[in-house]
Image: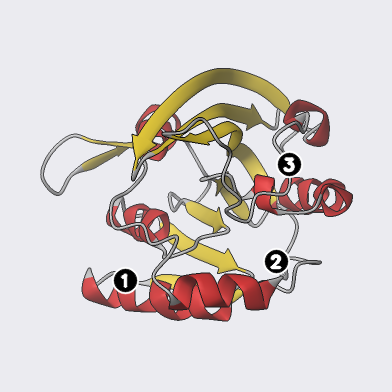
Amino acid sequence: MSKNWDIRFENGENMLFYPKEVFVRFLSCYIKKRIGFDKFESILAVQGGGIRGLDFGCGSGRQSVLMAEFGIEAYGVDISQRAIEISEQMASYFDKKVNFSVYDGKKLEFPDEFFDFTACLGGVLNCIPKSELENIAKELQRITKTYICVSYIQEKIDKNGDTPNLGIEHLDCDIEKLFDKFKLIDKSLFQITENGLTTTSELLIFKNFLEK
């Protein structure tokens, strides 16, 4: 599967040059908000003062770079080596430090509760076979201390009303059941139309009320 994504990124597909609006809102409501050109106010209280976040399925790294812009210790992982190379170029262009690494599709090499929050956006979970989703959810819950922000595509249609095959494995997974160790605190639908495609996604925000 990683080779297929390497090809997509090599061909310029899945490139994201602007942060996703839903992620900006998530950061501003739950993690940190901008109060000046270079000033931020922390919303999430953490010991030691520093906030650490993971962009799971980081793609071209734009969300990861945004975290660094917010003064967050940023990490990004992706199954595609080519995506990580592009992400590093993105971080270098914006002069931001981000810790990028390739994910083997099985185990995330981070300690328990290493991240204060994890973001999994852009339908990343849609592109993972259903047989692997339970393990992915367990791993994300294991390494995350407080918040998990997920966007899951429910429908993707082109101008002719057809559903294009863009690496999507499924559109009907019950994401709430996957993240059973965390509590769902916010859920909403949003729609984006770009490049002739209309995507309807569900945004789910989970919180760990059992954090130490």
Q: Does label 2 or label 3 sit earlier along the sequence?
A: 2
The image shows residue 103 at horizontal and vertical percentages of 67, 71
Which amino acid lies under the numbered mark 2 shown in the image of this protein? Phe
**Disc 3, SS:** loop
Of badges 2 and 1, nearer the viewer stands 1
Which amino acid lies under the numbered mark 1 shown in the image of this protein? Met
Nearer to us in this view, 69 or 61: 61
Instruction: Quadrant for the N terminus, please.
Output: bottom right
**Disc 2, SS:** loop
Label 1 near label 2: C-beta < 8 Å? no
- Disc sitting over residue 135 in the figure: none
**Disc 1, SS:** helix
Nearer to us in this view, 66 or 126: 126
Of badges 2 and 3, nearer the viewer stands 3
Label 3 near label 1: C-beta < 8 Å? no
Residue 71 located left or right of residue 59: left
As displayed, is residue 112 above or below residue 99?
above
Please give the residue where the numbered disc 2 appears in the rendered image.
110
Whole-number angstrom distance, CA of label 2 to CA of label 3: 28 Å
Q: Does label 2 or label 1 sit earlier along the sequence?
A: 1
Nearer to us in this view, 10 or 45: 10
Please give the residue where the numbered disc 1 appears in the rendered image.
90
Residue 2 located left or right of residue 89: right
Instruction: Quadrant for the C terminus, please.
Output: top right
Q: Which residue corresponds to the image point at 77% horizontal and 46% vertical from the top-left?
A: 137
Which amino acid lies under the numbered mark 3 shown in the image of this protein? His
Please give the residue where the numbered disc 3 appears in the rendered image.
170
Q: Which residue corresponds to the image point at 53% horizontal and 47% vertical from the top-left?
A: 47
Q: Which residue corresponds to the image point at 89% horizontal and 51% vertical from the top-left?
A: 131
